[in-house]
Image: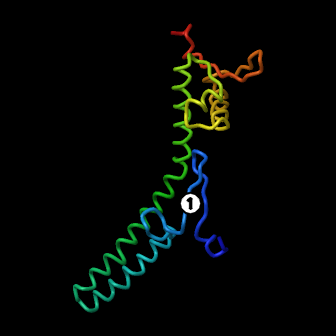
Amino acid sequence: MDDREDNYRREYKTERGGYRKSSHHDRKGGSKKSAEATFFSGLAFTVAFGVVWYMTKHTFWVFPLVFAGLLPMIRGLRYFVEKRTNAPSREIDVEARAEKEILKIAREKGGRITPTMVALESYLSIEMAEKVLEKIARRGYATMQVTEDGRIEYEFPEFLPENK
């Protein structure tokens, strides 16, 4: 792959550890522009075609005004708002899903689990499972114990058999 093509195509690591190729086109086939660029180009076309329509009074200019001006401007505004509101929530959603998955496994396994067990029973990697389990233990929902043979085990008191 030469340098020019490298500017347009890159590999991105996915959440599950695989790779996906991404080019300069998004999934819908349009080119990727920043939200601001889409909004301002739509605004410019809206003003330009609006002035032409106002000056000529021909209804023909309404179509470019809508399709080249208003729709891209609205799309840019929508992308801008989505980008601002969704960025932090995606990270939270991934972590919340991981915690919920770990809690389900802990309940199924009687309250005692290891990061390896979690990785085997879920989509999480061992490293991610360990990170989330440590966070859950720091918050006090589980306790971390080292067994006699050196394994790290997490105990969830709510799911232990003697508490039922």
Q: Residue furthest front?
A: 1
Q: Residue furthest bottom?
A: 56
Identify the image's colour scheme: rainbow, by chain, secondary structure or one colour: rainbow
Q: Nearer the viewer, residue 115 or 42?
A: 115
Quadrant of the frame with the N terminus: bottom right
Q: Is residue 119 above or below residue 61?
A: above
Tell me where residue 128 sits by quadrant.
Answer: top right
Instruction: Tell me which residue sits at (51%, 57%) in the image.
Output: 84
> In the rendered view, does 147 fall on the left or right side of 155?
right
Instruction: Tell me which residue sits at (73%, 22%) in the image.
Output: 151
Q: Is residue 73 above or below residue 136?
A: below
Instruction: Tell me which residue sits at (77%, 15%) in the image.
Output: 148
Label 1: element kind? strand
Residue 28 placed where, x, y %? 42, 64
- How many marks overall? 1
Q: For mark 1, does the 10 Å Cα neighbourhood hold few (<14), some (14 to 19), or many (20 or more) residues?
A: few
> In the rendered view, does 121 fall on the left or right side of 53?
right
- As shown in the figure, which amino acid type bears the numbered disc 1? Lys
Tell me where residue 21 sits by quadrant.
Answer: bottom right
Residue 116 placed where, x, y %? 65, 29
Q: Is residue 19 above or below residue 24?
A: above
Residue 31 placed where, x, y %? 48, 71
Q: Which residue is mark 1?
A: 21
Q: Is residue 79 above or below residue 133?
A: below
Tell me where residue 58 sits by quadrant.
Answer: bottom left
Instruction: Tell me which residue sits at (27%, 81%) in the image.
Output: 62
